[in-house]
Image: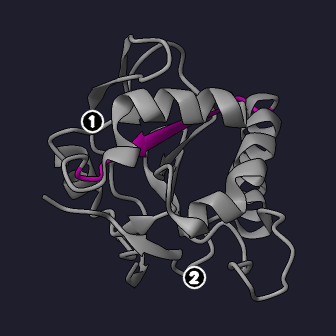
Amino acid sequence: MALTESNMLSLGIDAPSFTLPDTVSGKAISLHDGNEYAGTLIMFICNHCPFVVHVNAELVRLANDFATKDIRVVAISSNDVIHYPQDGPDKMKTHAEREGYPFPYLYDESQEVAKAYDAACTPDFYLFDKHLKLYYRGRLDASRPGNGIPVDGSDMRQAANDMLAGTEANPVQYPSAGCNIKWK
């Protein structure tokens, strides 16, 4: 595992479009599916990264809380499954069901979506406003495996609350950190 920080994209950019298979439902899920939302959180995660394992329960809590605020949550795994078979679609489905993910868990086989988002690590987070403009990119909170800080999603929750209140995005945002995406 190589500790990698997220790339800090420019705030206000448009969310890159995608259509990817959901490993749980088997349906193709698009960025533009369904209703207009008050916000959209795109998360790049995987099954085996200890940084993602560390925050899995909070991801479930956060997604359930965000659903009541009309914020859509989507997770994407872009890891190379040839060299990391534990991140393959069948294992993603099992993992999502075991963790109780209330959000789609999409498989980015070509890694083109991860490249479009300039994703670098797992977990990597991108919060977009109702116009699909980037409002927040960075860490969930200050917790990391072994640092003794509780996982509470405070940075992401604050960003979402500020976005919903119509507050201008805080330019001080800290990168996420975790395992690097396993590129082909």
Where residue 174 is drawn, which disc sits there? 2
- Secondary structure at numbered mark 1: loop
Rendering quarter of residue 7: bottom left
The answer, for residue 156, to whether it is visible in the render is yes
Q: Amino acid at mark 1?
A: Ser
Residue at 33 percent of width and 49 percent of height: 14
| Relative height, residue 51 to residue 32 (above, below) | below
- Secondary structure at numbered mark 2: loop
Q: Which residue is mark 1?
A: 17
Around disc 2, counting alpha carbons within 10 Å, would you say few (fewer than 14), some (14 to 19), or many (20 or more)?
some
- Measured as percent of width and height from the top left, residue 69 is found at 78, 34
38 in magenta: no
- Magenta residues span 69-80
Quadrant of the drawing holding the C terminus: bottom left
- Measured as percent of width and height from the top left, residue 147 is found at 76, 88
Q: Amino acid at mark 2?
A: Tyr
- Measured as percent of width and height from the top left, residue 75 is found at 49, 41
